[in-house]
Amino acid sequence: MEAALSRMESPTGDGRGLVPCTIRVLFQKKGDCVEYRRLGGSGVKVSEISLGSWLTYGGSVAEQQATDCIHKAYELGINFFDTANVYVRGAAEEIVGNALKGFERDSYFLATKVYFPMGEGPNDRGLSRKHITEQCHASLRRLGVDYVDL
């Protein structure tokens, strides 16, 4: 058995070992392939596979396809969904939020990010308290939730 990677290490190789699990996740039932691990010292268990929304939801993938993908991932046991305020200027967060509306909020782990510009002003990007606070509130509104997990 190989030693687990620390968060500072990167996997090596060409990724071929990931393909069988990915294919199984797409075509099998919940729990057959998805495994969970604790996130840091929080005690929260998240799926080892997360579903992100960069460059797809709100852009190159139709909303219904994105929703179907999120629903299928959830059905198969993926409980970690990742997005960001800047992905298609907030559209990805809206699609993810709409797709997750039918599920109990405590049944999934939701991550989003801030930093990149959401406007043209000098305070519309970065990690200032002002920008983080404004963008967190905007993300909560777009996602339609009361809190994000990360």
Image: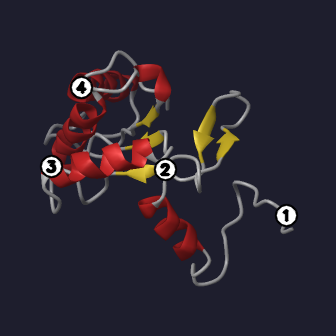
Query: Which residue corresponds to the image point at 40% horizontal and 21% vertical from the top-left?
Result: 104
* Residue, disc 2: 50
Residue 89, by quadrant, is top left
**Disc 2 vs disc 4: Cβ atoms closer than 8 Å?**
no
> Can residue 87 be seen at all in this image of the molecule?
no
Does label 3 or label 1 sit earlier along the sequence?
A: 1
Task: Decide if residue 94 is on the left or right side of residue 32.
Answer: left
Please tell me which of labels 3 and 2 falls first in the chain.
2
**Vertical placement of 114 versus 140: above or below?**
below
Badge 3 marks a residue whose secondary structure is helix
Residue annotated with mark 4:
138
- Identity, as a three-letter code, of the amino acid under mark 2: Ser
Q: Mark 3 points at which residue?
A: 64
Could you tell me if the residues under marks 3 and 1 are in contact, i.e. CB atoms within 8 Å?
no
Residue type at numbered disc 1: Ala
- Marks 2 and 1 in Cβ contact (< 8 Å): no
Which mark sits nearer the N-terminus, 3 or 4?
Answer: 3
Residue 17 marker? none
Q: Where is residue 55 in the image (x, y as percent from the top left)?
A: 25, 60
**Amino acid identity at mark 3:** Gln
Q: Which amino acid does label 4 sit on?
A: Ala
The CA distance from mark 3 to mark 2 is 19 Å
Q: Name the residue under label 1.
A: 3
